[in-house]
Image (tube, grey):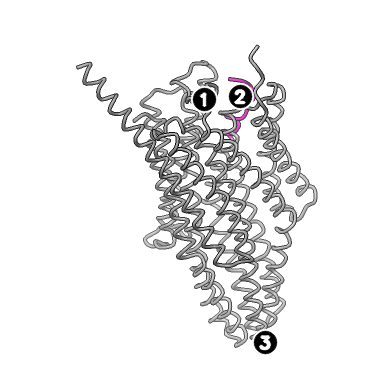
Amino acid sequence: MSARRLYIFGGIALIAAGLLFGDIFAVFMLHQNAARQGEALVAASRAVAAGNAAAVNEVFSHLGNVLEDRGTKVDAHVHMIDAGFLALLLALVQPYIALSRQTKKSLATLFIAGGVLLPVGIFLIHYVGLTGSPFAAIGWASVLADSAGALLVVVLIVQAWGFWRYLRSRQLSEPELPGFERPNEDSMPRRALLTGGTILVLLGFLHGAYYAGTLLYEHERMEIAILQGLINAATTGNLDAATTEVNNFGGLAGARAVNIAAHSHIIEFGLLAMLLSFVQPFVFLSEKWKRRWVKLLLGGSVILPVFVLLELKFGLLAGGIADIGGLMVIVGLVGMLVGILRYTGGLDAAERGVTEGAR
Amino acid sequence: MTGSRKLLIFGGMALAAFGMLYGLQYALFVEHQTLDHMGGSLAQSFSEAANRNLGQSQTALEQYGETKYDYVRQVDAHSHWIGLAMLMIVLGVIFERVNFSEGIRQVVAFSLLAGSALFPLAVILQTYHHGAAVLKALAVVGSSLVIAALAAAAWGFARPARPLK
């Protein structure tokens, strides 16, 4: 398998796995984790009211554990998908990387390995902790994650060097990906993915600008005000008011989370759609099935962020629909991956045939 | 390969590598300590309140707010540098499809590169000067450059191709 095919196959597999992990996390862990955070804050307010500082520290130790559990899973999800995106990107630029075929293949293998080990390391941080670690704050799982991250950086630097060599020699190291120049390549799936993807990214940018301009600083001020209100209520022994503040804190955390999730997911899906428009010539399926996967993927790309935002108004019903949107993207992606498997299988069989014929 | 494509692909790869290196050094040398400090300040705030030291409780809560302000911006800058770099590389591969003259394409590409570098940089600099209006304005300028460049690229994609002479 050539470096380009390794990047395409590995990249789509990483993205699909990252999305699936995110969907499982959203359905089975996200809301339960938020409830545990709320319970911990209620317990902290009771400990403050009772004047029990030791109990407060115990509650916060538990809360740190709950937050680490959530944070490492979100990070694993994000890093797995981003590594997949980068792999697809590197597939696109392979013709402009002036390195030997074997070097490029080795770099692709290292990149995919790093892309798998980085999220695995992050996921394990919560479970491994500082067990057997010689460092004060960094455990072995962090070492694994950081080493995998360093591996990705090294591969990227070598690729940049290869690109620099191309700029000096001006010689393509392999044929370019089939472009949009030929009319038969400018198919509906490619155009829909490219146009839809650009619009999704633009919408995500506009939403991000709106959030940063109108809500970000307000949310930061509200968080401190709510915590101050919680502490004041607890010290005066007003436990009902303290519980109300904990609920306000949960509401604020939810508002922040859905805005950030909608912003990041719509851009991610837009970028994914644009990237997938390039690999359509490698999807060995009939035009009808290609269109179906594209419609499913773009439909899910709109449904997920829109219904994530609507969670604030409609609660778990909207959350459930958002999860279905995520599932639609995964199914569309796996459908394309099957098409790419069929393509690479055909190429490998043809290469074997040529080799055997030469003997 | 045209100048605009080179700018986007090479600039994107350089920005992605820089964003990753920044994230790596932050994860290795700063993040764990910052998270410990953030959690510790919040716990201390509640703990002081339990001991009825309300002044110290408020100081610890303010420290928590400031540390979280920095942490959010550090992580945002890291992820936005890499995300925008990936977008630049993708656009670089298909920039011939943006139906403008090469001169306009170079302006769009440069705006995207400048905005992608400037916007997260202004966000990070806010951690050194909390709430500085100049830095907020720089972040707005950077993000506006990115949005304008992307809107121009989308318009260029939608425009019909000129017939070959």
Q: Alpha-carbon neighbours of circle 3 within 10 Å: few (<14), some, or many (≥20)?
A: some
Residue drawn at 43 percent across, 21 percent down: A174
Q: Give, as a single range, the part of the protein colored magenta.
A: B1-14
Q: Which residue is at the front of the view, A58 or A204?
A: A204
Q: Quadrant of residue A254?
A: bottom right
| Residue A209 picture location, percent across and down | 71, 49
Q: Quadrant of residue B42?
A: bottom right
Residue for badge 2: B96
- Mark-to-mark CA distance, 2 and 1: 10 Å
Q: Quadrant of residue A245?
A: bottom right
| Residue A237 picture location, percent across and down | 66, 88
Residue type highlighted by circle 2? Glu
- Magenta stretch contains residue B158: no
Residue for badge 1: A179
Residue drawn at 43 percent across, 48 percent down: A331
Residue for badge 3: A238
